[in-house]
Amino acid sequence: MRPPARPGQPTLRRARLGNGLDVVLSPERSSPTVALGVYYRTGFRLEPEGRTGFAHLFEHLMFQGTRRVPKRAFGRVIGASGGVLNGSTRHDYTNYFEVLPSSALETACFLEADRLQNLEITEETLRNQVDVVKEEVRVNVLNQPYGGFSWLWLSQYAFHTYPNAHNYYGEFGDLEAATVAEAQAFYETWYGPGNASLVLTGDFDPDRALELAERLFGAVPARPDPPRLDVEEAPPESRTEHRHRDPMAPSPKLALGYRTAPFGDPDHLPLALAARILTDGRSSRLQRALVQERQLLLGVNGGPNFPIGDAFEFRGPALFTIEASPRPGVSTAGALAALDEEVARLAREGPSADELMRAKRRELTGYHASVDSRLGRLRRLAELAAVHDRPELVDLLPGRFQAVTEEEVRRAVADWLRPERSTVLHWLPAAGRRGDA
Amino acid sequence: MSPPSPAPDWPPAVPSPGPLPRLRLGRPVEGRLSNGVAVMVVARPSVPRLELRLSVPAGAAVGASAATSELLRAGILLGTRELDQGQVSEAVQRLGGSLQVHQDQDRLVISAAALSEAEEELYRLLGALVAGPAFPAPDVATERLKLLEALRQARATPEFPAAERLQQLVYAGHPYGRPEPGEAEIRRVGGEQLARLHRSTFLPGSAQITVVGDVRPVATLERLERGFGGWRGRGRARPVAPVRARRRPWVTLLDRPGSVQTVILAAASAPPMGDPRHLGLQLAAAVLGGGFDSRLMANLREDKGYTYGAITSSELHLRDTLTVTEAQVRTEVTAAAYVELLGELGRLATVPVPDSELADTRRYLAGAQLIFLQTQAGLASALAGVRAHGLDHRYLEHHAQALDALRPEQVLDAAGRHLGPEAVTVVMAGDAARILEPLRRVASVRLEPAPPARLSPAAGPGGRPSRRGRAAAPPPAPRRG
């Protein structure tokens, strides 16, 4: 089923400024709000060796003031404009975004253009944000049961080259060793206009928005293209299993990560649908078979780039992850055997027509829900533009999902979700300190 | 405590935003189904979907045990005599929909969505679920295990036990202070208990349905009647008892040996949404810990680097608002961070907020509301929240104006009564061996032993039960990174 064309359906425009900045505009006027995102093509994989966590630390520095807008003014101005803001770091991009009343669009554009050009990094702000990031790691990882479980730890076992297999949040020693000069060099290398996409969604006039982008961002000098680093690595040829012990965890959990299909591969969309068929909702295969019928698990979830992202936000090698919580009395090994059986069954028999139809319907409603939200629309659109250079796909994907067949899902599962291409992490309660068991 | 750093001025180069756009919600259609359900429908055809919220008084408010009400929440999804839980989930997915059940201290809320073309089928399915849930014994047994495991995991975190203890202290003697269920209590709940609670909770005469989406409201009323008209039940829920919150003038410290951070919670009771004093509190709380450049973020994070985030949020109970300030700080600076936090509370309670900071904060709140209400889902949740408080869409529409009309002395008064150092009850969870002695230099502290880390030998989970139920959810708290 194709999404019906409607009067409110958004349209797209794209332009490239003289300095190389990619501009993508998606006006939609149903509420007087806009979202603005600047996506830089750098992330976890590209941070220097010996400086784990640097891409994320640098993201924090982008909020620490410029030569024209002092520290804390960015947050104050956005808040006082009625807006909210945030940023995040991912494998292949780092993003900064604001959602605002439409009357504040120029204010936000000014601030983003300013920090693209005039960032000021000082010893004081760097030391302050190293402290803040260490508290972020403590609050999300070190002081939490299952802290960082599959997103932070599984990939360190599943990959073997530095870009894919290091601690993305950062070893404290590396964070503390970061210098202002290194941050400045990182900014010069990766934060040029030619390495970024500016994306606007929501209530604005596209001609005027393009003028605004030209006026505020067009004045930023071009910088040399950043180096193209090779982050590819061959998939594993046999399964490895690893044990992690966690004194805070009351019960064991299991994470299973398969190498997943890259964007553009014929199996890419079928695998995204397979994730829904396997784990989405109480009618999914794994919940039905292993939680309700065989009573081996209490919970199961997963998908491409789970749990921090989806099938569209990465360019280099990535994992299709399944997380499972065994019932009391069931071992993680028992849970693993049962998961293997169910995945193999899908690879052998494929989904039923009804299963696939339901997965497609959820893609379609997910698409509509994202169009309804400025930020939801921005995220998918900006990933497609900045990471894959294909923003026009944003409104074509629902139709492409509808075209996937049962046999394509079966084959994708059979090709990619094979035990020998997977890595297993047993997360176990234990006395003593956290670490490898 | 170090002197507060003043808010930075608006940098001269930065263009000012235009006036805030007006919030326009459209005209709701209201009605009552033949069984007494109160309905509100708002047409918002932004995308071809619809969002529904069905709310009934539940939980602590109706005197149910914590275990039974938490299991009733999950039990609604277990299906009817005709449809098992997997078939319910399949049916929802065929409608392009979603279905969740949430619960706070006052209400149980079913949140559902579907493609507009499946509107009628969605109402039929939900009508069957609320009228005749089956609570099959094996599925209830699994839900008991899931709940036990979720609570085990929640109790292993630093923040959950602290929040639980805080509610017990502030709302002692009131249903809002009821702790999360224990293991023995959970094991006693079966299908019969759930059926009984269902009969006394799912009363159409006390229920509210809110629909927002690409619908024709008059036709929607008729479709709702067809879907939910067969749902019967006698009687109405009793109103929740008024709150007499208590303040504990000491720091309650939950020992968490080896903890590398300390959770600090400082909370006080205040009038509920709809009370004239509520808005002053909302504004004061936002100045303190609302946005990225709130006073707490500026001090504890951007100046001192003690924490990743310091946030003030409100739990909007029907009979009370609990305003909670939370920060997780590294163990070594616990006492220093506590002094800074108390200093910010004291400043807010004694010194009027400067006009420019007040104006910025008003606009921050009004803008956050515009953003939250931009989607069908946000508007449906917000309307369901205000309706539960006996208010309606006009409360949302007039919110920005009402904030503008507040005088600085009203904000000062609200802060003094409900946020000041002499108003809050403080609970911390951290490594007593390292923080008790420094803390005792600045506070009287009552040390409580660590809660048992493991209730019994067991294995794996589901999501954490949400301790902090929210009626009308405010925009998400800012967290950078």
Image: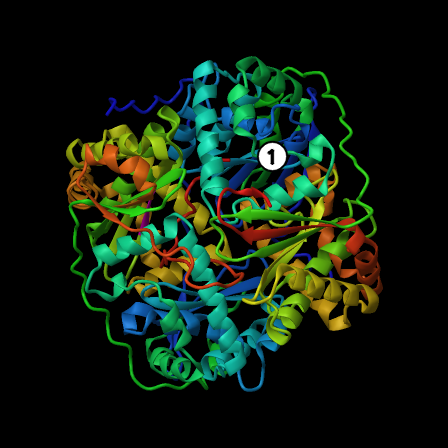
Left or right of B129, for residue B475:
left
**Front-lying residue, A277 or B160:** B160
For the N terminus of chain A, give its image quadrant.
bottom right
* Rendered location of residue B186, percent (x, y): 40, 72
At x 68% / y 60%, what residue is drawn?
A336
Quadrant of residue A95 within the rendered picture: top right
Question: How many marks are shown on the rendered structure?
Answer: 1
Quadrant of residue A282 within the rendered picture: bottom right
Q: Which residues are magenta?
A: B310-314
At x 49% / y 77%, what residue is drawn?
B140
* Rendered location of residue A202, percent (x, y): 55, 43
At label 1, which amino acid type do we have? Tyr
* Rendered location of residue A230, percent (x, y): 78, 29
Left or right of B90, for residue B1:
left
**Front-lying residue, A402 or B15:** A402
Quadrant of residue B360 within the rendered picture: top left
**Front-lying residue, A416 or A236:** A236
Does residue B410 appear in this view?
A: yes
The main secondary structure of the magenta stretch is: strand
